[in-house]
Image (tube, rainbow, N blue to C red):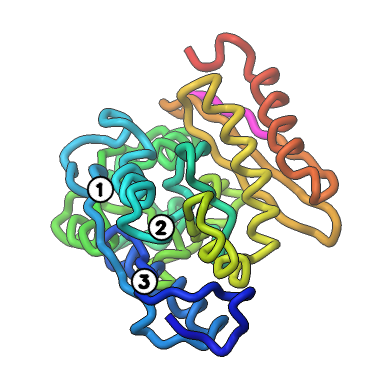
Amino acid sequence: MTSDLPPRDLPASDRPLKIGTRGSPLALWQAHEVRRQLMAAFSLPEEAFETVVIKVTGDQIQDKALREIGGKGLFTREIEEALLAGEIDIAVHSMKDMPTVQPAGLVLDCYLPRADVRDGFVSPHYGSIAELPQGATVGSSSLRRRAQLALRRPDLKLVEFRGNVQTRMRKLEEGVADATFLAMAGLIRLGMADVARSAIAPEEMLPAVAQGAIGVERRADDPRVQAMLARIHDRDTGLRLAAERAFLLRLDGSCQTPIAGLAMVEGDTLWLRGELLRPDGTGAVADHIRGPVAEGAALGEALALRLLERAGPGFFG
């Protein structure tokens, strides 16, 4: 790998930098966007990179709900194993799929600018949740989305709905469900924003923690890669995710429940909203907190503790 930058900015290498990713169209777009930003930051040719597609358990098992087969690590475990083994140099992830704790030896401290955080409502026949008729069928694999929808529309029938964007669109066409939800960020990145009949405001449906954010994971003992990723890291996204992921981390150790969270940076202030729901949608608690942006992690933990106290010991059944 060559560059017109001095070695102290970009240590030399005689082989392509290997980017590990899942193989879906969206995952490949994200990996290629990381490549594009690194190429621009260091005036590197495309040949200086190699994209390595890694099959993960979550993509291979499509006939079961995620909660039945192990949770978020299903989309990251094999990629992180390849990173630790030196088979790849960096790993590109959708941050909403990432566990809150990384394996020993790995670091997650590079985020690209965050995209649209909203959920998109997708349906062949209806324009919004409000337009769905009584008893309509909605497909989703997201525990959060299912709970939020059950809370607002208990009349609807909810069914399991997994797969990438293309698979879910095909299921809608086949009549498996009347509607589903897809993250607006993914649709926009794939040039498919018009697939969503409407985008749902966070005030109506608070998104998943870290939704719309792309993270790049590296080995802790790789200073060359650390120097490269520092050049493309988006500070604003990092501040927001520090709060959201601290919020999620504190809750993960306490309960298995649908969780939503969104942080916004307003000058020197960080505003974090959070929501806990019963899986069946029969109850929810929500609150928000504001404080200095530098204290995002502490704010996230404080909001989590506040919600747990408000929920009380009987909330989760």
Q: Position of residue 51 (x, y in %)?
A: 31, 70
Residue 158 against residue 223 in the figure, above or below: above
How many other residues sit within 10 Å of disc 1, few (<14), some (14-19) or many (≥20)?
A: some
- Magenta span includes 45: no
Tell me the magenta residue range: 282-286
The residue to which callout 2 is attached is: 91
Query: Could one spot residue 153 in this view of the protein?
Result: no
Earlier residue among tags 3 and 1: 3
Earlier residue among tags 3 and 2: 3
The residue to which callout 3 is attached is: 29
Inter-mark Cα distance, 3 to 1: 17 Å
Earlier residue among tags 1 and 2: 1
Inter-mark Cα distance, 3 to 2: 13 Å
The residue to which callout 1 is attached is: 56
The three-letter code of the residue at mark 1 reads: Val
**Would residue 142 appear left or right of 217 to someone viewing this image?**
left
How many other residues sit within 10 Å of disc 3, few (<14), some (14-19) or many (≥20)?
A: some
* Camera-nearest residue between 58 and 141: 58
The three-letter code of the residue at mark 3 reads: Trp
**Would residue 299 appear left or right of 54 to someone viewing this image?**
right
Q: Position of residue 72 (x, y in %)?
A: 38, 39
Inter-mark Cα distance, 1 to 2: 13 Å
- Residue at the image position 18 percent from the left and 61 percent from the top: 170
- Residue at the image position 37 percent from the left and 52 percent from the top: 83
- Residue at the image position 59 percent from the left and 54 percent from the top: 109
Number of marks drawn: 3
Residue 301 against residue 126 in the figure, above or below: above
The three-letter code of the residue at mark 2 reads: Ala
